[in-house]
Image (cartoon, helix red, strand yellow):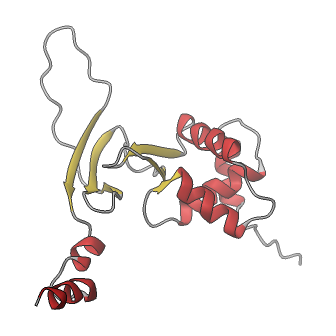
Amino acid sequence: MKHHHESPFSAIESAIRATGARVTYSRIRVLGLLQSAHAPLSHSEIEGQLNKQTSPEIDRVTLYRVLDWLVDVGLAHKAANVRGVFCFTLAQPSIKHKQHAHFRCNDCGKVICLDMAPPPEPKLPNGFRLTSMELDISGECPDCVESHSPHSDQRSKTMSALK
């Protein structure tokens, strides 16, 4: 009996093939990184993480092209953070990305897709057609809240210095 061990990237390769496009090393690596990411990543964050873990490196232009392609075919999403930097996330088929809410951290700039129903569609004037809708909610993420809490080390040092 022959045992078939699937590659850890077989699901990623299948997703790329399903678009009708060629499966390439760069597409597999970028999509794999987005799949394992816990938060949206900017181009430079993706570039840094990929080039720490892969050989050969993926050059900057190729990375831009791969990210644009992933967004175009619906395998990834792109949204600007509060600093205007585009960040990328893995597309989740169960979420309609065109109509949902984002939480944007005012301090660190993280953008998180919220798992909640979108707000109701607005009534538009005659002749208008809604093509997409996003709700941006802003505030502080748990990491930034913790870093600003009275119990954090940095805050304690600052308070001590003021005394």
Q: Residue at x 82, y 71 (%)?
A: 4
Q: Quadrant of the N terminus?
A: bottom right
Q: Closest to the observer: 94 or 30?
A: 30
* 153 sits left or right of 45 in the view: left
Q: Quadrant of residue 33?
A: bottom right
Find the residue positioned furthest to the top. 127
Q: Quadrant of residue 11?
A: bottom right
156 horizontally vs 46: left or right: left
Q: Which residue shows up at 27% across the image and 84% down it? A: 154
In terms of image quadrants, where is residue 65? top right
- Quarter of the picture containing the C terminus is bottom left
Residue 152: x and y in percent read 24, 86
The count of marks equals 0
Q: Position of residue 17 (x, y in %)?
A: 71, 43
Residue 14: percent from the left, percent from the top?
69, 51
Relative to residue 74, is residue 30 depicted above or below? below
Where 46 sits versus 2, above or below? above
Residue 64 drawn at (x, y percent): 62, 42
Q: Tell me what residue is drawn at x 23 percent, y 46 percent.
A: 136
162 and 30: which one is in front?
A: 162
- Extreme-right residue of the structure: 1
Horizontally, residue 155 falls left or right of residue 56, namely left
